Image (tube, rainbow, N blue to C red):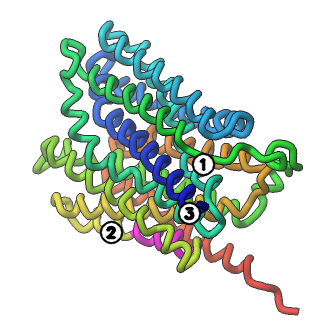
Amino acid sequence: MQLSRETRNVGLLSLCQALGQTQMVLVFSVSSIIGASIAPNVGWATVPITFQFVFMTMSTIPAAFLMKRIGRANGFTVFLIIGCAGAALMIYALFLQNFALFCAGSALFGASAGANQQFRFAAVDAASDEFRSKAVSLVLAGGVFAAITGPSLSSWGYDMISPIIYGGVYLVILSMQVIMMVLLRFTDIPPPSEQERTGHVRPMREIAAQPAFIVALLSAMIGYGVMNFVMLSTPIFMHLHPTHPFGQLDINNVIMWHVLGMFAPGFFTGYLIKKFGDLNIILAGAVISVICIGVNFSGDSIWHLRVGMGLVGLGWNFMFTAGTTLLLSTYTPAEKAKVQGVNDFFVFGTVATCSLLAGVVYSQFGFFAVNMASAPLLVLVVCAVFWLRVKRQPVAA
């Protein structure tokens, strides 16, 4: 019965993760285009996506504490309702061609997306100790669905509810959020225990001083930040290439390779963590991301871009999944909500910052400067892994 319950919960949460990631792919594919068409100034085109990331970051801690109080399924449902309101508001904003309303809808959707990032922690709640790393990995693997279906759904939703151009994309997003709420009703995630609700909670500075916490946070922050930094600048580089600009189909194809690199390894990353240890997988992820930088410097053909984007996705998968697994060892049940919320606050705060910086660095210094700026951060992760290994070594008597 234990295995059946674990399998069912992980399967349902993987489906929710798949739908959530597909929504993100849909938003990435159209948000800037919509912003450029309805904003008072073309320079404001990325403001809606910035609102999304800011509110995504801000929702992480409130979502964690709400789930501690009312349970995972109910907490996710509350934020999905907020997301539905955001999608409906964006459809209305497109009907009115109102940029301010569209930004407000993006903010509400971002709050919902921030809560969705905790599907991986929900899988851990319903898993045995031996199944935890696999549960995190398999839930993240649900994003493979996003890579396959996202571009097609974006094209399909373009004029679905004409004359509201792109309104169909947000109608698809709203429908997916309703499906996610239904799926959550069939999960069987244990409610917060008495120890989790009333147990002693250490000050955050004491928890954050643990070497394992520092490395786990650095791994997730830098893995996600570097991935986002390179991923957002690559389509710009392709579109504005000085000698042979790439078409939209080529750009979509490269992004598909990237998303597959991010999520397809989820089917086996948990096994690798269990076999080789979380620190070795973090180290492998950092090295793979450095190799991505080397590929980007070696050429700019479509195959160089496909391989480079696939590698930075794989590096993210290893660093983020293993960092999440390492984080699980740094807190007690009573500290879970606080630590998970703070971790995601810093991770997605880094993502929001990198999203803003990617365009600035690219416009000022170019695509290769973006790659070079990523390298020192990855070296920092490598150094942090070796530092923690030294800390873990027993002191001789």
At label 2, the amino acid type is Gly
Considering depth in this image, is 368 or 177 the residue closer to the camera? 177
Coordinates of residue 252 in the picture (x, y in percent): 21, 45
What element does badge 1 sit on? helix
Instruction: Please state if 381 lies on the left or on the right of 197 as rendered.
Output: left
What element does badge 3 sit on? helix
In the rendered image, the residue lying farthest to the top is 96
At label 1, the amino acid type is Ala
Whole-number angstrom distance, CA of label 3 to CA of label 1:
16 Å
Residues in magenta?
279-290
The structure residue drawn at horizontal position 64% and vertical position 49%, both measured from the top left corner, is 343
Q: Earlier in the sequence, mark 3 or mark 1?
A: 3
**In the image, is residue 288 part of the stretch drawn in magenta?**
yes
At label 3, the amino acid type is Leu
What element does badge 2 sit on? helix
Q: Quadrant of the N terminus?
A: bottom right
